[in-house]
Image: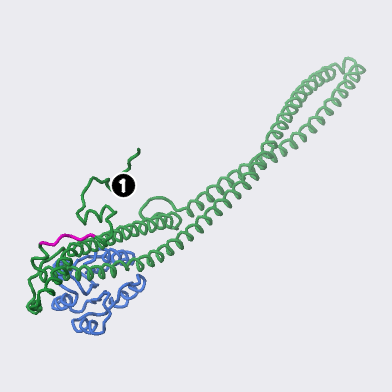
Chain colours: A green, B blue
Amino acid sequence: MNEGIQTQPREPGLTPAPEVPGEIAMDRLVVETELAGYLPHLSRMSKQLKETSQQIESSVVGVCNSFQGIAERAKQTVARTTGFLSQEGGKDSNTTSFESLIDNCSGTLVKILKTTEEASEISRRAIERIHQMDQASQLISAALLKLEQIARENRMLAMNARIEAAHAGIHGAGFGVVAVEVVSQTEKSQQVTAQVSELIKNLRALAGSTVDDLQRMNDRDRKRVEECRIEVDESLREMQATHSEMKSVLSGMTDAGAMLARDIGSAVRGLQFQDRTNQQIAHVAEDLDTMHAKLTTRLGPAAAAGIALDEGFAAYTMHEERRIAGIGGVESAAGEVELF
Amino acid sequence: MRTVMIVDDSVSMRQMVGYTLRQGGFEVIEAEHGQDALNKLAGATVDLILTDLNMPVMDGITLIQNVRKQPAMKSKPILMLTTEGLASKKEQGKAAGATGWIVKPFDPEKLLQTLAKVLP
């Protein structure tokens, strides 16, 4: 590829200018002078084409770099999400996967529920035992009543014995003393029976209130366990639904990533127009340079003395065009903002 | 990971081919012409070369001829990736030792498929 203008020596095969009559020679001089005036435009056009080619190439390189960044970020995002949701957890992290987390939570909640159910069962059994103890107390009360009955009969018997002892006179005196003693012992026995009755009554009252408390606690626990079970089931269902949703989002992201890769592939194919365009531009610029070099050699002194002819050429309105054309002046840089 | 050397005087083409190959899981070494490729080959292990045809300093055909002289590169695949599609040029490439010829613009997916085919 040629860079800039290269003045080449007259090629050996180039036909020398033939001898011509004066009028024709004059016309030729006019043509050559005019041609010489256009020469600077040839090199300018070549330079402009080369710069345009470079600009297109650097834009394409920028786009490609962006593609690389987009693709890398998409890959990383999918990899991170996949790692988070996978069974193994993050590949290089110590974090637990979402699925194991759900399993762990579920396991822990089931254990808590089981423990609560066991506690509830224990209090239910305690109530049952207290009921059994109450029944035993009732039997003791019944036995005490019998003892009371026996005591009353003993007193009656002792009273009859005293009467009989009185009838027997002096011979019954000892018997009377025994009867008095029997009455006394019976009274003591009745007092003990009354005390035991009272104790049993208190014990039964205490057992009754304990049973009530335990019953209330048991009912409350059962209700709470049931509520917890419903809440846990609901939470686990929600966690599983969220997990499924995340999986579906991930699947969507993977599909989107694949589509993105395909789109970038199409864009990469499309962007290759630049390679062909650059080659074409390079060939045109090369031909322009050759044309410039040949004309410069052919025109000789006329080319050196030629004045640039701008007539019929586009005005240089863009910064870069003016710069290539060598037109000076104060200009704002690209991206510069000035408020008036 | 397999390593592919891309030889092209166009920066953008190297970028585009490089992007495609990296996405395909390849390691990439870039060279801007044949001589640059030969210099870089001296200190590297390359599984495949993907080269342009027309380049300054040293063109693709000359590069292939030189590469094939190296014992380590005698049987490694070398693919031409060029805008040139003339049968006579292809014949020159084949004679020099090219494994295949891909005409630009390339299709990224097809390029990866072709690499998978020619790599042992």
* Stretch of the chain drawn in magenta: A305-310
Which is more toward the observer, A336 or B47? A336
Rendering coords of residue A79 (x, y %)? 40, 57
Residue A307 in the magenta stretch? The answer is yes
Which is more toward the observer, A179 or A72? A72
- Near mark 1 (Cα within 10 A), the count class, few <14, some 14-19 or many ≥20, is few
Residue drawn at x 38%, y 59% is A75
Q: Residue furthest right?
A: A167
Q: Is residue A127 left or right of residue A89?
A: right
From the image, tell me which residue sits under label 1.
A335
Q: Which image quarter is the N terminus of chain B in?
A: bottom left
Which is more toward the observer, A299 or B104? A299
At label 1, the amino acid type is Gly
Q: Residue furthest front?
A: A23
Number of numbered markers: 1
Asked if residue A145 can be seen in this view, the reply is yes
Task: Check disc 1 and report its element: helix, strand or loop.
Answer: loop
